Image: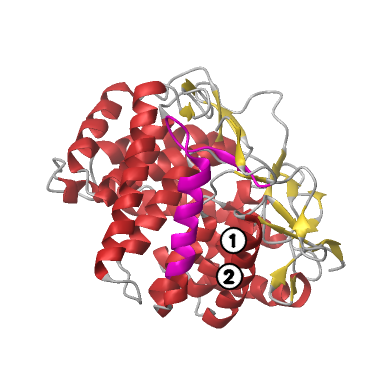
């Protein structure tokens, strides 16, 4: 499970409520926005009081645990959220603390994917927001800065993962010694295709093209290994280039590959990436989309293998809004919201045919994807019904997921906190 999701969730809800115009009164909008700010602050203080300097808070036992690398990861995750929330004093304090304490020369194994999206991405985001917070920057900002230097140090550490026959990265590196000798060559598609946003931005800011080039090479390697009908599978060997799991879809293991083709293409002005996405979009419409739902299919035949909606797929309507597919996005979003209304939250897996949770996949680990899609679509449409969706998410989380020191995963069947993250 992706850690730190509550930070993204509260960020999306806060931004969403900051730019809202609707049937809600201005006072109501401000009230909901301030509730989100308080929810974030409660969780953040819970981490500082009970978990720092560990990576994450365990909100049932109110203690800390290292997860992805002993980075005090929640502090890095929280930097841009602190800026969004307007807490510039704390942003500056934590930035200084991280500059004094972060050390990437350690004998530890880390996730390449998580280190990129959370450490490299978090530090770049903080760097780009830093001037607005009053953080001291040089005359050469944004092309120079201490937070950017830290991001580049972290990115250099995970570059070793890309030294493969295909250019696709391993899933794990040791910060001191590179790829572990016993590391499996098999990784998920998202683990290959989710670098261009951070690596591309880092190259453009620093002038060092090695990062963007590595990310592009990995994307091209995936593109070259599409099936005859144009789909990709779920897991692949980064050395042989052969698929080891052939289920295709838009959910777990593949999701952010598609997301980064769009966001990377728009951010970097790279039409090649957008063209790739639009080609995928055609085959997704042909084989994976079924009545405004998206199922899992055999990547070679296009036949349905699992009529399942995964909560991670809730990012898709937001992505569609970025490429102008508003009507399609709204239809899928309404389907996902109906599941939320039915169950109180989005389960990890939901059987579309039978309209029920897949056995043993009934948890809701505070995933932010639905809130992200609601935010993007509200910015595009100003549809007031989307505000009601956001309000319902806020009320459900506050009512059920809150503990004495933070917010935790919820069992949809029992409607109580059930996992210590």
Q: Mark 1 and mark 2 in contact (Cβ < 8 Å)? A: yes
Residue at 35%, 23% (x, y): give it.
Answer: 49
Q: Quadrant of the C terminus?
A: top right
* Residue located 43% across and 65% down the image: 375
Neighbours of disc 2 within 10 Å: few (<14), some (14-19), many (20+):
many
Q: Is residue 194 magenta?
A: no
The foreground one among 295 and 330 is 330
- Residue 197: x %, y % from top left: 45, 55
Instruction: Locate residue 95 relative to residue 411 in the image: left or right.
Output: left
Which quadrant holds residue 177?
top right
In the image, which residues are magenta? 387-412
In percent of width and height, residue 242 lies at: 79, 49
Question: Is the residue marked by circle 1 packed among few (<14), some (14-19), or many (20+) residues within 10 Å?
Answer: many
Q: Which residue occupies the extreme bottom position in the image?
A: 327
**Which residue in the structure is indicated by mark 2?**
333
- Residue 290 in view in this figure: yes
For numbered disc 1, what is the local secondary structure? helix
- Give me the residue at 30% from left, 67% from top: 19
Residue reaching furthest to the top: 107
Q: Earlier in the sequence, mark 2 or mark 1?
A: 1
- On the image, numbered disc 1 is attached to which residue? 314
């Amino acid at each position: 499970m992706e850690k730190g999701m509550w930070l993204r969730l509260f960020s999306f809800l806060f931004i969403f409520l900051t730019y809202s115009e609707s049937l809600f009164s201005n006072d109501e909008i401000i009230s909901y926005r301030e509730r989100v700010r308080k929810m974030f602050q409660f969780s953040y203080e819970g981490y500082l009081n009970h978990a720092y300097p560990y990576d994450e808070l365990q909100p049932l036992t109110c203690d800390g645990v290292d997860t992805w690398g002993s980075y005090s990861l929640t502090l890095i995750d929280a930097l841009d959220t602190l800026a969004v929330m307007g807490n510039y004093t704390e942003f500056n304090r934590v930035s200084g603390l991280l500059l004094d304490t972060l050390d990437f020369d350690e004998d530890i194994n880390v996730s390449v994917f998580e280190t990129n999206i959370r450490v490299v991405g978090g530090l770049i985001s903080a760097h780009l927001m830093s001037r607005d917070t009053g953080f001291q920057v040089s005359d050469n900002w944004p092309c120079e800065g201490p937070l950017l230097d830290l991001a580049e140090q972290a990115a250099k550490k995970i570059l070793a993962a890309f030294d493969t026959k295909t250019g696709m990265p391993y899933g794990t590196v040791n910060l001191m010694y590179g790829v572990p000798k016993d590391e499996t060559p098999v990784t998920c598609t998202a683990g290959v295709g989710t670098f261009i946003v951070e690596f591309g931005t880092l190259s453009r800011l620093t002038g060092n093209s090695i990062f963007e080039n590595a990310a592009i090479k990995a994307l091209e390697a995936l593109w070259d290994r599409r099936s005859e009908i144009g789909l990709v599978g779920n897991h692949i060997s980064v050395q042989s280039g052969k698929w080891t799991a052939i289920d295709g879809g838009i959910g777990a293991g593949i999701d952010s590959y598609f997301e980064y083709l769009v966001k990377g293409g728009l951010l970097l002005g790279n039409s090649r990436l957008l063209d790739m996405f639009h080609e995928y979009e055609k085959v997704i419409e042909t084989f994976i989309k079924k009545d405004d739902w998206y199922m899992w299919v055999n990547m070679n035949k296009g036949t349905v293998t699992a009529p399942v909606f995964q909560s991670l797929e809730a990012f898709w309507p937001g992505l569609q809004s970025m490429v102008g597919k508003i009507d399609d996005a709204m239809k899928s979003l309404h389907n996902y919201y109906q599941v939320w209304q039915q169950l109180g939250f989005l389960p990890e897996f939901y059987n579309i045919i039978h309209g029920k949770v897949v056995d043993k996949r009934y948890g809701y680990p505070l995933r932010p994807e639905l809130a992200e899609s609601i935010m993007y679509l509200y910015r595009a449409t100003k549809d007031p019904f989307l505000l009601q969706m956001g309000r319902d998410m806020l009320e459900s989380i506050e009512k059920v997921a809150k503990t004495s020191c933070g917010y935790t995963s919820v069992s949809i069947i029992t409607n109580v906190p059930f996992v210590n993250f």
